[in-house]
Image (spheres, rainbow, N blue to C red):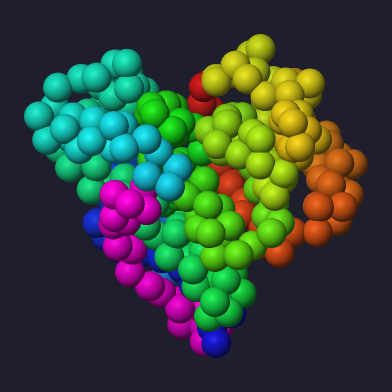
Amino acid sequence: MHLARLVWSPRLLEYDFGPGHPMSPTRLDLTMRLIEALGLLDRPTLELADAEPASDAVIETVHDADYVAAVRHAGTTLEPNVARGLGTDDDPLFTGMHEAAARQLGGSVDLADALWSGEIAHGVNIAGGMHHAMPGAASGFCVYNDAAAAIRRLLDRGAERVAYLDFDAHHGDGVEAIFWDDPRVLTVSVHEDGRTLFPGTGASADVGQGSAEGSVVNIPVPARTTGPAWLRAIDAVVPALVREHRPQVIVSQHGCDAHGRDPSPT
């Protein structure tokens, strides 16, 4: 058994909103070049696996069928569907949008399968983390929510407790919304306060509902929070929550925009 698996395909670079868009696929190319330069792919504990597009049936475990059809249509005709978040400034249209987003999601779901079956102990999808995508709409550069789909696959395979830890600068609103009332999933998001940053949500008073009340945890921090203060917020809350939930699997999202040198204001 390999200890870890990295899913990668050059075709993941096809998730491309065009010149000038903040989320350029160049970041993925540079990341893979760095991984190779560091010799990480030569280590026997890490294997590289292809990323294949997920089927509609898999995507529809977390997204509405009408939305999936809308994404395919918009990525073919390039006709905006603003009601679905398609063709906005954040999510401009591009040819093959459905296929590119399905490949992102498929990579994360395949990792969830491999982990649950015991093939690997850790999995990484550097193209994933599309945590803003909602069941019926694209949002914040995210078309399909691969993190939520990976969690759904784990639950469908028999997991009883999953923890989702989100350390992006932005609130993990899409994953939270999908599992808002599911007590099996602990969602923890550490992010800049929604009063100063997109998507404007993630207040500490938002805790889930029904039998899942308390399984949603939001830790908003002020803008320009420094590294030591950010780490203190995590250390004071996250380890105890995870220990209490006793997850069988942890799914985590690590947006580089939480880094102090990231210049992006949104």
**What residue is rendered at 32% in x and 26% in y?**
91
> Magenta stretch: residue 41 in it?
yes
**What residue is rendered at 37% in x and 45% in y?**
60
- In the displayed image of the protein, which residue is found farthest to the top? 195
**What residue is rendered at 87% in x and 52% in y?**
244
Question: Relative to residue 1, is residue 90 depicted above or below?
Answer: above
Drawn side of residue 65 relative to residue 237, left or right: left
Question: Relative to residue 187, is residue 161 depicted above or below?
Answer: below
x and y, in percent, of residue 95 in the image: 15, 37
Q: Quadrant of the N terminus?
A: bottom right
- In the displayed image of the protein, which residue is found farthest to the front? 210
Q: Is residue 12 visible?
A: no
x and y, in percent, of residue 11 in the image: 24, 56
Q: Is residue 144 visible?
A: yes
Comparing 260 with 28, the one in front is 28
Drawn side of residue 79 relative to residue 14, left or right: left
Drawn side of residue 156 relative to residue 192, left or right: left
| Magenta residues, start to end | 37-59
**What residue is rendered at 63% in x and 20% in y?**
201
x and y, in percent, of residue 55 in the image: 29, 55
Comparing 215 with 17, the one in front is 215
> Magenta stretch: residue 264 in it?
no
Comparing 93 with 250, the one in front is 250
What is the tally of numbered marks visible in this picture? 0
- In the displayed image of the protein, which residue is found farthest to the left? 77
x and y, in percent, of residue 161 in the image: 71, 56
